[in-house]
Image (cartoon, grey):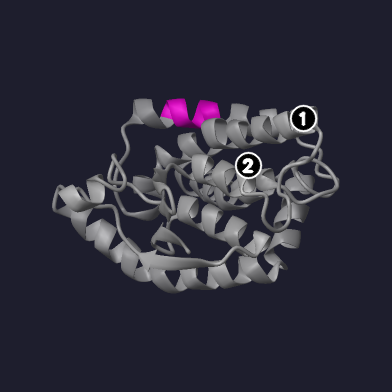
Amino acid sequence: MLKLYGFPVSNYVNMVQLALMEKGIAYEYVLTFPDRSEKFLAMSPRGKVPCMETPGGFINEASVILEYLESLGTGKALLPADEVARARVRSLMKEIELYIELPARMCFAEAFFGGKVPDAVKALARENLLAGIATLKRHGSFSPYVAGEEFTLADIVFFFSIELAARVGQVVFGLDLLKDFPQATALLAKLHENPNVQKIVAARDAGMPAFIAATRARIAAGG
């Protein structure tokens, strides 16, 4: 059986878990936090989660794990059969990660944990976030899903990235990134109705207060 190593507050862990649940693949969830021990670095070279134990060994990085799960050919397909359509889904996934999730992540310390991000970093993050949202508006179909009529991996990356980015926009920049993006707002509402999403979100929300408190304490201590 596959083993998913991670913790419920990690949006990247949640991406992998949702794919597993949507595809109906049996797995064991091993509660694991980022770790620099020799044992964990042998499993995940950067000491990050998620990582996954497979019959052939460990694999890491969420996007790679998502592709691995799809390559198994088990359960519901989360990539289209047509190669060009598959490439478009992958492009959307990459664009959301590079131009929305990662710029927002640069400001997580200030948005969620009581830290302070340098002004130069915030300026770059703001510029990239606005450009990323504009890119998604141009490239996404939202009919009703990101890439078209079918739920794909792009929707998984979208869901676990866009709300965090919107929070950063609101708290750090005083911006409503979704104000003129009703298609994204509608898709978020639709995905929140998914029973698997609801289970993951419930676990995330239950673990969030303790995680925020621990992270704030570490930042305050200079860790």
Which label is found at residue 83? 1
Q: Residue at x 43, y 67 (%)?
A: 29
Q: Nearer the viewer, residue 28 or 11?
A: 28
Residue type, mark 1 in image? Glu
Q: Residue at x 76, y 61 (%)?
A: 190
Magenta residue check for 213:
no
| Residue 25 in which image quadrant | bottom right
The x, y position of residue 106, in whole percent, is 40, 37
- Name the residue that disc number 2 marks: 177
Q: For this view, does 202 lie left or right of residue 45?
A: right
Q: How far apart, in angstroms, are the residues tagged by discs 1 and 2? A: 32 Å
**What is the magenta segment's predominant secondary structure?**
helix
Report if the CB atoms under discs 1 and 2 are less than 8 Å apart: no
Label tally: 2
Q: Secondary structure at mark 2?
A: loop
Which label is found at residue 144? none
* Magenta-highlighted residues: 123-129
Sequence-wise first label, 1 or 2:
1
Q: Residue at x 71, y 36 (%)?
A: 89
Q: Secondary structure at mark 1?
A: helix
